[in-house]
Amino acid sequence: MDTKTSNEIAAAVADADRLLIVAAAGLSISTHLPNNPYHNPHDFALHYPRLGAYGYRTSYECMGIGRDPNVPDSIKKALTARHFLNMRWNFPPTAAYTWLHELSETFMPGDVFAWTSNVDGCFVRSGFDKDHVYTTQGQMDKMQCGACSSVFENEQQLRAIDAASPDGELTDMSLAMRCPSCGSQDNILPNLRGGDWFIHAPYQPTQERLLAWLDEAISKKLRVAVLEIGVGPNTPVVTRTPAAAFATALGTAGGAVTFVRVNPDRAEEDYGPRGDIPQASGVAYYRWRAGWDALKPMLDAATVARAARRAGEQDKEGQRVEHVVTITGVGAPGSAAEGGEDAERVVEARQWQERYHRIMQSLRTPRCR
């Protein structure tokens, strides 16, 4: 992207009322540390050397290792502990999280939301408000029990398992993950989305806050900057598709959206439903074919511009009243426009609004049968 366009985006972000950050794995992949075991065989072998003997070359391939009878349980449990500790606690967030947090600090509390499929806690570790970070796929710092359906924090048990696995194999199987509520060691699973058995309950309050935040932006016809970073075509319904539906609803309703999609992958027309690209006259859509490291000049410029504008507003007003979004629950989507506006736009905005509501509500599992 040329400098002129980058400056144009920075100016639009600086002028926004709210900031929505939509992120996936690409935002967490380091460009200089060997911290990408999911897709890089070298990084995987460095951190998990025992698995090569069983034919595994990446963590992505290991997602089904629990069903592999050739790998001993003692190695599976050691791998899970070390991998979760690496991804959630040991591997540092990329610099982009810091840049994004610096930008977020120029907005008023409540005017920023992060919506991510990443399970590594990088937004919270970088200073973002945990109540405004929706981790749609779950989090690596939690396990769930199939016996009593409780969800519990896992760090202490992971560290005990890892300490007893110096060579990548658990030496004391009595340390295997145990549910603190019922004591069961059977059917203990990561609290990560992988099927209808995933327990969404810990994340539902934040999802409801996000839905209300999105709906309010539409009802007030706000200016929202949407920065979508590192989101590819895999599982688009968890972030990509509903975020684009929100942008389309807001633009159609009379708000303004600056939607920036940052990803080094192939062009959008090569994959995904058309609904993955925001479509409304009120949306300025930019496709930036690059990694997160290319964002720094734009984010720096937007941060400086917003900080200057905020300081000027504070001087002018003498005292700025903090804006807090109060959430009392989310029902059916509200009206996207007021009386007197074109009826067709009202209907269209409502349809797009209902689209992201339906998608996000479908993510609430387990489902009743």
Image: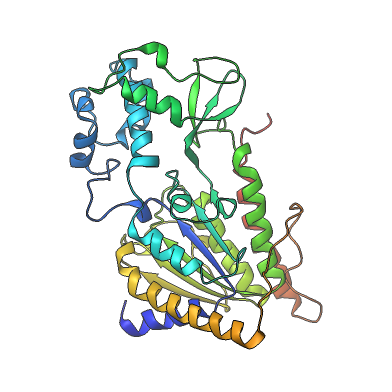
Q: Measured along the vertical axis of the image, is residue 14 above or below residue 118?
A: below
Q: Measured along the vertical axis of the image, is residue 176 above or below residue 134?
A: above
Give the total of numbered labels.
0
Please indicate whether residue 12 sits to the left or right of residue 345 in the image. Answer: left
Residue furthest out toward the bottom: 316
The residue shown at (58%, 62%) is 245
Nearest to the observer: residue 341 or residue 114: 114
Please indicate whether residue 309 sits to the left or right of residue 8 in the image. Answer: right
Residue furthest out toward the front: 318
Residue 348 visible to the viewer: no
Q: Quadrant of the C terminus?
A: top right
Q: Measured along the vertical axis of the image, is residue 302 above or below residue 363?
A: below
- The percent position of residue 320, horizontal first and vertical second, equals 66, 77
Please indicate whether residue 282 sits to the left or right of residue 368 in the image. Answer: left
Nearest to the observer: residue 192 or residue 151: 151
**Where, by quadrant of the figure, is residue 216 drawn?**
bottom right
Nearest to the observer: residue 105 or residue 217: 105
**Where, by quadrant of the figure, is residue 336 drawn?**
bottom right
The residue shown at (62%, 32%) is 366
Residue 137 visible to the viewer: yes
The residue shown at (49%, 62%) is 21
Q: Measured along the vertical axis of the image, is residue 362 above or below residue 304?
A: above
- The percent position of residue 288, horizontal first and vertical second, equals 36, 70
Residue furthest out toward the right: 339
Q: Quadrant of the N terminus?
A: bottom left
The residue shown at (57%, 32%) is 196
| Colour convention of the picture | rainbow
- The percent position of residue 19, horizontal first and vertical second, equals 54, 68
